[in-house]
Image (cartoon, helix red, strand yellow):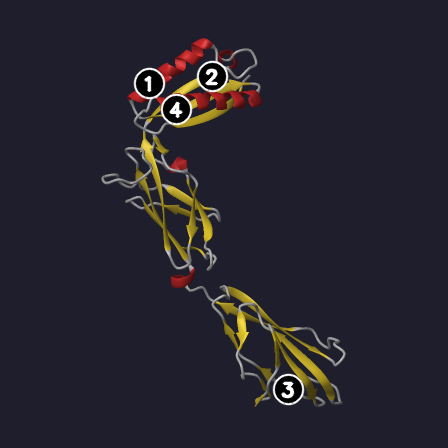
Amino acid sequence: MNKSNRLVSDLNVTDKIPAGFRYVEDSAEIDGVATVPVVNGLNIVFTNLSVAANSEIVLRLQMLALSSAASGRHSNHATVTDSSGNTLAPAATAEIEIMVEPVFECGEIIGKVFDDRNSNGYQDEGEPGLPAVRVATVNGLLITTDKFGRFHVACAALPDPRIGSNFIMKLDPRTLPTGYRLTTENPRVVRLTAGKMTKINFGAALGRLVRLSLKDDAFVASGLELKKQWNEGLDQLIAVLSRERSTLRITYQTKNQKLAGQRMKVVQKEISRRWKAGRSGYQLNIETRVEAGK
């Protein structure tokens, strides 16, 4: 719009269309009259324009959203300059919003929390779901399983349309039934694909809890090696664990938490080695905890 009392000429208008859009050929008009702008990539340029005193001209064009245009808001910018390239007015902006198409763009999540009675990490025939267990997404969405242990996250994410995107879910162990412990990885990371459904299952099993308490006196001087009697006692521990499916919890009470952490790793590694060597019938879950001593 020209609000002055004189003709303004030699104007250029550059319309920069958003990435993922394309100018529709032969769609440009000036005051309803077809015109051919200069197309330079995303820049559509109208050259040598004139606006009479106290009047305006209207420029129109059409653009097409390509498959590469992501869902969400996109901005179109237009600027007017004189023959020397000086900007004569603030840029005009138009917002374009592409709505999400759930069928083709969303990544859906379905899953189940199940009673993993054989602790193999997979839901086998006859293993029921666990109700009222809570799972969460990284953005804070909380979901509770139904009476069959099932859960569903509609449009959990908008994955990258070319390569997909990672998605993380975590089960809250505090909401498992009393005595149950996880037998599958937690949290779970899966790859979501646009327009497809992905399954995430969590297994938990009811088992005996066996506790092993350690103190500084169990180790040789300030080293990492267990004293002889404690080292020999590990075989007895393996025998106890073999009788019934169990979870082993090792606690260490000490003032030197750094040294205790190193010792715990050595003990855990040795127990795992002996457990595998004995070819026991299930996968042993070992929990460790260092407690500050008085």
- Name the residue tied to disc 2: 214
Amino acid type, residue under disc 3 in the picture: Ile
What percent of the width, then of the height, locates residue 85? Answer: 74, 76
Instruction: Name the mark on residue 240.
Output: 1
Q: Residues within 10 Å of mark 2 (few under 14, many from 20)?
A: some
- Say above or below: 266 vs 8: above
Provide the secondary structure element on which disc 4 rests. strand
- Name the residue tied to disc 3: 57
- Name the residue tied to disc 4: 248
Amino acid type, residue under disc 4 in the picture: Leu
Provide the secondary structure element on which disc 3 rests. loop
What percent of the width, then of the height, locates residue 97? Answer: 51, 68
Instruction: Describe residue 226's horizontal placement relative to residue 119 as left or right.
Output: right
Provide the secondary structure element on which disc 1 rests. helix
In three-dimensional space, the C-alpha distance between marks 3 and 2, rounded to whole angstroms, equals 85 Å
Q: Nearest the camera: 130 or 243? A: 243
